[in-house]
Image: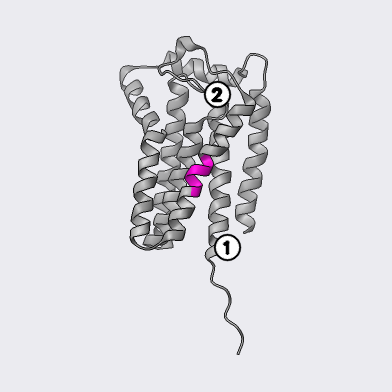
Amino acid sequence: MPAAFAVVLGCAVLAGEALKQAETANGSTPLDSSITSWMVAHRDHVLTALARILSAIGSQKVLAPLAGIAAVLLLGRRRMVAALWLAVAWGGAIGLYSLTKHFVLRPRPPAGIRLMTVSSSSFPSGHATQSLATFAALAALAAVALAEVRSVPGIVLAIGLAAAVGWSRVYLGVHWSTDVFAGWLIGAAWVSSVLCLSRRATRAPPSAEP
C-alpha cells in the first residue's frame, strides 16, 4: 500500500514539525496567537452556540456511543473483524493523543479566553484526533457496505466534520491551532495505518495453481 505509507509518513513528518512549534517557552507561536486572537475578536452568540455543539460532537461522550452502535450493527451482520478494526481505530486514536499529551505537556491558551473548562494539557487536540480517526473509519466502513463508488460523500463528510470540530476547539479558546493541526495529522496517520492493515488482513489469499 504505497499510498497509505505515503500518507502515514507525510503525517508523521508534519506532526513532528507541529511538535517543534509547540515546544516554545510561552506555549504558543506567533501564528497560534494571531489565529486565536482573531477568533476571540470575532465571537458572537450564534458562532459560540455552534462551536459548543461541534465540540460536543467531537467528544468521547458522542463518539463512544456512535462507535459502539456501529460496532453492534456490524456484529449483528456477523462482521466481527470490521467491528474489531473500528474499535482499534477509535480506541487507538484516544491512546495516541493521551500518551502524547502526557509527554509534551503544552500549556493551554490563557484561562481568560476559554469558553469551556478543561484540565489536560493542550498538545495535541484530542477532539481533532479522535473525531478524524472515528469519522474516517466509519466512512471507510460505509464505503465498503454501500460500494466503493459511493465512498466520496462519506469521506467528504468525515473530513468536514473533523475540520469543524477542530475549528470549534480553537474558537472556544481551549486549543492552539497547532494542537488541532497535529491532532488531525495523528488521526489521519493512525486511521490510514489501521485501514491498510485491515485490508491486508482480510485480503483473500490467491488460489492455488492446478
Q: Quadrant of the N terminus?
A: bottom right
The answer to whether residue 109 is above or below residue 180 is above
Determine which of the numbered discs, if any, sits on residue 164 in the image: none
Q: Residue at x 55, y 34 (%)?
A: 97
Q: Amino acid at mark 2?
A: Ser
Determine which of the numbered discs, if any, sits on residue 200 in the image: 1
Nearest the eye: 33 or 182: 182
Nearest the eye: 64 or 185: 64
* Spatial CA span between label 2 and label 1: 35 Å
Q: Where in the figure is residue 40, as x and y percent of width and height? A: 44, 15
Q: Residue at x 49, y 20 (%)?
A: 119
Look at mark 2 in the image and give the residue it sits on. Answer: 122
The span shown in magenta is: 88-93
Q: Is residue 69 visible?
A: yes
Q: Amino acid at mark 1?
A: Arg
Under tag 2, what secondary structure?
A: loop
Q: Where in the figure is residue 201, as x and y percent of width and height? A: 56, 63
Q: Where in the figure is residue 84, as x and y percent of width and height? A: 47, 54
Quadrant hosting residue 122: top right
The crowd level at tag 2 (other Cα within 10 Å; few <14, some 14-19, many 20+) is many
Q: Quadrant of the C terminus?
A: bottom right
Residue lying at the far top in this picture: please name it.
112
Answer whether residue 100 is magenta in the image: no
Q: Main secondary structure of the magenta part?
A: helix
